[in-house]
Every structure is written in C-alpha cells, then in structure tokens.
Image (cartoon, helix red, strand yellow):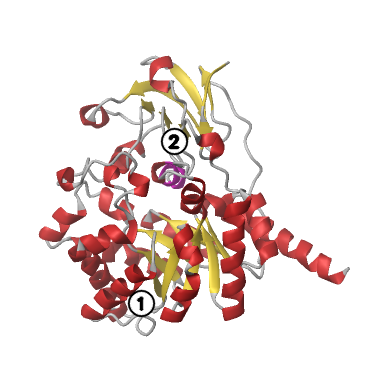
C-alpha cells in the first residue's frame, strides 16, 4: 500500500524502520539501514546518510547535491514529500522506491532489472560526473573521461568549513588527495576539475560554518566563483592543489569555473591563477561552466578572452531563466528543463562551439535524461557527462540518437 509520494532520485530501493532526524545528535545515533526521515538534507549530513537504508525528505529537488551524491552511494532517496516527517511514524517498517518516488507500508519486493547492458561506443564522448573519488576506478573503464569533479564533497566529509581547513594548512592536501585518486583511475582520459561551488546554507553546519551569512535563497546568493573570489585564500588553495598534481606529472587535468555571471569574474580568476604560478591554457586547459543567462548571452566575450572547453549546466540555467527555485517544492511544476527559452540559449552556444571546434559538454542531471540527450545530439553537442550509474544506459541512448541523425541525412 502506497502511503506517501515524493520525487524519486535514483533507481534504488530501501527497506527499513523509520528513523526521524531533527538534530545532529539524532544523526550520530544512526545504527545503519534505517529509513532516515527529515525535513531537508544538507551536504554535511552525507557521511551519516550513506549508512541509511533510504532517505526521505519534506523538501528538496531532483537536482539537489545531496540527492545526486546519495545516488552515487546507491542509497534510495525520495525528496519533496512535503509531509513525510508528519506522516511517517517512528519505527514503522516502510519500503522506499527511489525510482517512482513511492513509499510503501511494510516490505514490498520490487522487480529487479535485467543484467549487464551492452557497451556502446558512440562518436559523442560519454563522460561521468564524480563526487566520490573511491568509485573512480570502477567507472573509469566505462567512461570517456570526467566532465566534472565536484570537490565540495571532499571538503564536506571532513566536517570542517574550507576556511578552517585553510587556517590549519590542510585544504590543499584534502583537495589534491581526492583529485589524485580520480586522475589516476582515468589517466590518460581527460578529467575536468570544477572549482568550489556550494551555497551558504550547506556550509553553516560544518565546524567553522558560523562565518556563513543567512540567505533566503542561497542558490541565487553567494555561491560559485563569486564566493571564491571573495575568499581568495580558498581559491588560491584550489589552484595550489592542482599545481601540485601537475608537478607530479598528471597531464590529463582540466579546470572549469562555475556559475559565472560575467566576463570580469573569469578574467579575475585567470589573474589569480597566474599569481600562484599556474598559466591558464598553457599549464592546464581552462574552461567555463555556463549556467546563467548572462554568461550564455555574453559568450562571444568569453571566446575572445580564451577558452579551451565549455560545459553546460541546465539545472541552474533553467532556474535562472524561468525564475524558479529548483529546490522549491511549491514551484516544482514550473521547473521545466524543456522550456523553449532554455533551449534557445543552449542551441546558440552549441553552434558557436562547433564553429570554433571546441568541446561542448552537458553536465549534471540533464545528461541522464534520454529525451534531453537525444535533442542535444541532434543539435550537435560533442560530449555528455552523466551520473555513474547511468553510463551504460546513456551510451546506448547516444548511439541510437546518432544513428537517427545519420539516417535523416541519408534519406
């Protein structure tokens, strides 16, 4: 019997007793295997939530960082139930279906999927996004590279704010150690390192997080490269970590700058790179993650300044273009990745990248959506970067989409 519905974020299923979480002390008392029920999940909880049999939240969206990481950890997760903490009773046995978003009373056996899928090798590169270095060795043979190393999880799982790690002279090492594992596993395939991007509300729970301001809408607040530019020491630490790896001989690394609002931020980043002895475009390929309408509409300026590759972030682009908080349950129906305004911006940049002979890669949740990927292949995108558990499926989708495009030209 279905007792609650939300938004499923993964193909996994979890069965266990409900354990409601209201504070950090509750997290520390988790035994493992429980169905964790809470109002909202934050990144600083991930080290505890990875032991859960499933996670259910009142708030949050499909594209939230916690949902993405739990998927990599193969933990069933349902977000945006709105009333989960009210309806689900402590200790009750429930089944969480991370695929449909349904939550059932008692134990419900789910139909298992078929065995391994065929390995397709399309012309379009099929890369992977990684939050967890430890799974790199397993997914590297299936992927054409890493479209985005999201270093935030490396920091959050230490339990310390990056500013505190910096003061303890540990930040460089934490970043370098995590990236090294991934670069090793994928060598010689390209690995794109994304500089720090985490909203203020997901940093306040860390040791030292009291320095973070309170913001009503953190996803449109102090985040992305602007946050790093205001905390130059942290950005310099990221660059020093990459420089260390380059000195060690890792030649498959690239660096990309997230959530840019205008060219001045990109130029400031390049200046700081040079100050720490890292020459952009020479020592390391440098690209941008286009995620705001302003960066799409001023793309010609970025091209003139110099770019080695581009990645596209559809979740943030859609949020900014449609003025819809992508974590907001009340406005979730208006968050439309297929909106014509979003696709007009995407097509414009893809065409310009193809004209320049530059790699253009779609990253994030959108790269796991077959309908979106098919349309991007038709537009001529050169690579996609999907979730680790979706690589084989998306290889098949991309291969079929390429065949369909070729068939049109042959008619």
SS assignment at label 1: loop
Q: Is residue 362 magenta?
A: no
- Which span is picked out in magenta? 67-72
Q: Is residue 68 magenta?
A: yes
In this rendering, the answer to whether 84 lies above or below 247 is above
Relative side of 9 to 233, left or right: right
x, y percent for residue 265: 33, 68
Which image quadrant for residue 197? bottom left
Which image quadrant for residue 276? bottom left
Q: Main secondary structure of the magenta part?
A: helix
In this rendering, the answer to whether 243 lies above or below 5 is below
Which image quadrant for residue 225? bottom left
Location of the C terminus (image quadrant) = bottom right
Residue at image location 64% in from the left, 60% down from the top: 376
Image mark for residue 129: none
Residue neighbourhood size for the residue with mark 1, other residues' Cα within 10 Å, grouped as few (<14), some (14–19), many (≥20): some
Q: Residue furthest right?
A: 411
Location of the N terminus (image quadrant) = top right
What is the CA distance from the residue labelled 2 to the residue labelled 1? Answer: 41 Å
x, y percent for residue 392: 61, 55
Q: What residue would you read off at disc 2?
A: 328
x, y percent for residue 339: 61, 48
- Tell me if I can see residue 118 in this picture: no
Image mark for residue 250: 1
């Amino acid at each position: 019997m279905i007792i609650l519905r939300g938004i499923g974020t993964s193909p996994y299923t979890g069965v266990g007793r409900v354990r409601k979480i209201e504070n950090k002390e509750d997290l520390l008392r988790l035994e493992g295997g429980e169905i964790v029920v809470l109002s909202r999940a934050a990144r600083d909880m991930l080290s505890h939530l990875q032991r859960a049999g499933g996670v259910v939240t009142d708030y949050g969206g499909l594209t939230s960082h916690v949902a993405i990481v739990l998927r990599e950890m193969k933990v069933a997760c349902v977000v945006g139930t709105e009333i989960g903490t009210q309806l689900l009773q402590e200790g009750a046995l429930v089944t969480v279906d991370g695929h449909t978003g349904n939550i059932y009373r008692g134990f419900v056996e789910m139909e298992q999927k078929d065995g391994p899928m065929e390995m397709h090798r399309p012309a379009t590169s099929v890369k992977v996004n990684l939050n967890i270095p430890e799974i790199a060795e397993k997914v590297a043979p299936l992927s054409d590279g890493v479209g985005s190393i999201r270093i935030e999880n490396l920091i959050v799982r230490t339990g310390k704010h990056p500013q505190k790690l910096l003061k303890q002279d540990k930040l460089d090492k934490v970043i370098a150690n995590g990236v090294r594992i991934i670069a090793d596993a994928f060598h010689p395939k390209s690995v794109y390192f994304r500089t720090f991007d985490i909203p203020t509300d997901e940093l306040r729970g860390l040791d030292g997080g009291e320095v973070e301001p309170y913001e009503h809408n953190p996803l449109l607040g102090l985040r992305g490269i602007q946050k790093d530019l205001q905390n130059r020491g942290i950005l310099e630490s990221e660059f020093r970590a990459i420089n260390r790896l380059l000195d060690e001989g890792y030649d498959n690394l690239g660096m990309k700058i997230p959530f840019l609002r205008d060219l001045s931020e990109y130029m400031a980043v390049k200046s700081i790179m040079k100050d720490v002895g890292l020459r952009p475009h020479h020592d390391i390929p440098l690209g941008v993650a286009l995620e705001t309408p302003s960066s799409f509409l001023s793309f010609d300026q970025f091209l003139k300044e110099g770019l080695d590759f581009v990645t596209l972030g559809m979740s943030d682009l859609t949020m900014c273009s449609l003025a819809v908080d992508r974590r907001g349950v009340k406005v979730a129906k208006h968050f439309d990745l297929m909106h014509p305004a979003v696709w007009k911006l995407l097509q414009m940049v893809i065409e310009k990248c193809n004209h320049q002979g530059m790699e253009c890669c779609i990253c994030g949740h959108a790269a796991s959506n077959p309908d979106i990927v098919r349309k991007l292949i038709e537009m001529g995108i050169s690579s996609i970067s999907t979730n680790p558990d979706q690589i084989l499926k998306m290889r098949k989708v991309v291969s079929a989409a390429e065949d369909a495009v070729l068939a049109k030209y042959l008619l």
